[in-house]
Amino acid sequence: QVQLVESGGGLVQDGRSLRLSCAASGRTLANYNMGWFRQAPGKEREFVAGFRWSGGSTRYSDSVKGRFTISRDNAKNTVYLKMNSLKPEDTAVYYCAARPRGIVVVTSPHDYDHWGQGTQVTVSS
């Protein structure tokens, strides 16, 4: 079983940056797909970014492409989401997710098996 713990959220002003972390434990993630999702009040959970831990393509939603970067630290078993040029519309609870199969990065939250508790990101205008 994989446990995921997010951290790094907070309140920032429009145009500033934040880096979220997702610490994974319980199992090696070598064959996992990892994803970041977010959910704003009254909206569905949406895909933000994802990659396959063992390598391959990285995928971003159109709304964050060019501003957000997903990365990992193998030694720390940690996934990061660096968020630059934040906008008020980026305000949401951000979740880390893991999927123990697949070659292609998928974007539906229903395809991910393991989730963290979420971390709040609020961008003020």
Image: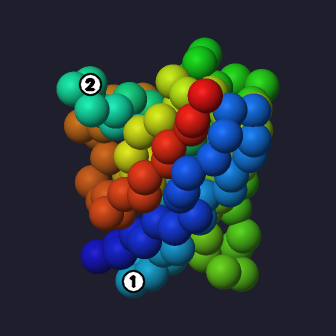
In which quadrant of the rendered image does the N terminus lie? bottom left
Residue 77 occupies which quadrant of the picture?
bottom right
Horizontal relation, residue 1 to residue 84: left or right: left
The mark found on residue 26 in the picture is 1
- List x then y, in percent, for residue 41: 27, 32
Q: Position of residue 79 (x, y in %)?
A: 61, 62
At label 2, the amino acid type is Lys
As drawn, 44 above or below 52: above
Q: Amino acid at mark 1?
A: Gly
Q: Residue furthest front?
A: 125
- N-terminal-most mark, 2 or 1: 1
| Mark 2 residue element | loop
Check disc 1 and report its element: helix, strand or loop. Answer: loop
Visible residue check, residue 27:
yes
Where 14 sits versus 96, above or below?
A: above
Q: Residues within 10 Å of mark 1 (few under 14, many from 20)?
A: few
Q: Image point 71% across, 81% down: which residue? A: 75
Query: Tag 2: Cα neighbours inside 10 Å, few (<14), some, or many (≥20)?
Result: few
Query: Which disc number belongs to residue 43?
Result: 2
Pick the residue in front: 9 or 70.
9
Q: Is residue 43 above or below residue 20?
A: above
Residue 27 percent across, percent down from the top left: 43, 79
* Percent of width and height locating residue 93: 39, 46
